[in-house]
Amino acid sequence: MLNRLAELYKKQGKWKESEQLYKRALSIRERAVGTEHPLVAYLLNDLGVLYFDQGKQTEAEHIQQRLSHIIERTNLSLNERDNRNAAADDYYDGGSDSDDDDNYYGFPTPDS
C-alpha cells in the first residue's frame, strides 16, 4: 500500500513525499523477502522512474545497476509485472482502462 500512496504523491508532484514512501516500502520489502527478490526489483523500478522523471540521473543510474543485477540473477522481466498489475488494476478499477500505466516506461532498463 505504501507504494500506491507513493505513486499518488508522484502524480501530484509531491516528489519528496513520494520518494520517502518508496524508500520506506523498499526497506520493508527487503527485510521481508531479501534484497534480490523480484518484488524488490519492482519497487526499485518505481523509485528509479521517480528519479528519472525528476532528472536525478545519478540516483536513477544507481537504481538501474541494482535492478540490472536482480534481473540477471532472477531472469526477471518487468513486463511480467505489467501483465499482473494490469489484471489487478482492472479488477480494482471495475475493468476501466486508464492512463495509469506510465509507471515503468520512462526508466531505461537493461532490455532497452
Image (cartoon, rainbow, N blue to C red):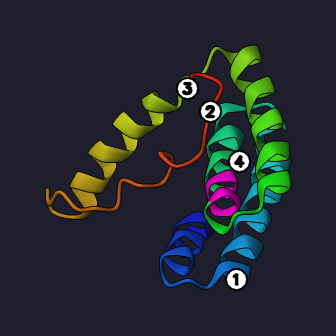
* Circle 4: element type: helix
Callout 4 amino acid: Leu
Callout 1 amino acid: Glu
| Front position among marks 1 and 3 | 3
N-terminal label among 1 and 2:
1
Mark on residue 6?
none
| Front position among marks 1 and 2 | 2
- The residue that mark 3 highlights is 112
Q: Residues within 10 Å of mark 3 (few under 14, many from 20)?
A: few
- The residue that mark 2 highlights is 109
Q: Main secondary structure of the magenta part?
A: helix
- The residue that mark 4 highlights is 44
Residue 85 in the figure: left or right of residue 18: left
Label 4 vs label 3: CA separation?
A: 17 Å
Q: Is residue 85 above or below residue 51?
A: above
Label 1 vs label 3: CA separation?
A: 29 Å
Label 2 vs label 4: CA separation?
A: 11 Å
Q: Nearer the viewer, residue 29 or 77?
A: 77
